[in-house]
Image (cartoon, rainbow, N blue to C red):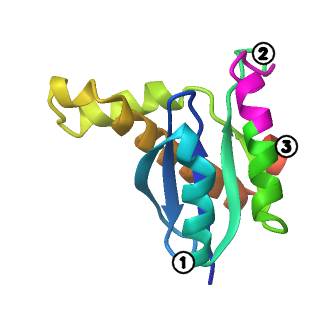
Amino acid sequence: MARILSIDFGRRRCGIAVTDPLCIVANGLTTVETSRLHEFVCDYIRREEVSLIVVGHPTDMHGNDSDSMRYIKPSIGRLRKLVAPLQVVFFDERFTSVLAHRAMIDGGMKKMARRDKAIVDEISATIILNDYLQSRQSGLNANLR
């Protein structure tokens, strides 16, 4: 079976998470510089079977696109062309950074390690993917765009 890959897109770096081949569990994979995102994803899908790419969709409290979408949309548009016919979908990522910090604290991570934004990005990608998997199980695909 094929994996699902998720991306927490950032201007400097992107957190990447992936499911197991049965699409049951999401795990952090890595963090890559945004300038290398397309290369990384294309290389990964050549090596591993991927059925879907989920990209975090940053919104405000009212569900409107955040300002960062002006950077994300063009890059993801190029990614869609590179990986076609593989589907790339946006999924609501509200509060993932807050949840990532909470997970690091709850996991006992030291304060200095929690300052590493790359770790936060990878955990955020994992949270996005877990939320996507839960919504799929619940049949709540209303957050897909």
Closer-to-camera residue (117/93): 117
Q: Secondary structure at mark 2?
A: loop
State the residue at coordinates (63%, 64%): 42
Q: Secondary structure at mark 1?
A: helix
How many labels sit on residues?
3
Q: What's the distance in space between the residues labelled 3 and 2, CA to CA?
A: 16 Å
User: Which residue is labeled 2 in the image?
Assistant: 62
User: Which residue is labeled 1 in the image?
Assistant: 47
**Rendered location of residue 132, percent (x, y):** 65, 51
**Rendered location of residue 71, percent (x, y):** 71, 26
Mark 1 or mark 2, which is nearer the start of the sequence?
1
Residue 40 is drawn in which quadrant? bottom right
Closer-to-camera residue (106/13): 13
**Rendered location of residue 39, percent (x, y):** 59, 56
Mark 3 or mark 1, which is nearer the start of the sequence?
1
Give the residues in magenta.
Answer: 64-74
Residue 128 seen:
no
Mark closer to the observer (2, 1): 1
Mark closer to the observer (1, 3): 1
Q: Secondary structure at mark 3?
A: loop
Specify few, some or many for label 3: CA neighbours under 10 Å numbering under 14, 14-19, or 20 or more.
few
**Rendered location of residue 133, percent (x, y):** 62, 58
Specify few, some or many for label 2: CA neighbours under 10 Å numbering under 14, 14-19, or 20 or more.
few
The kind of residue on which mark 2 rests is His
Q: What's the distance in space between the residues labelled 2 and 1, CA to CA?
A: 39 Å
Residue 88 is drawn in which quadrant? bottom right
Residue 35 seen:
yes
The image's mark for residue 145 is: 3
Mark closer to the observer (3, 2): 3
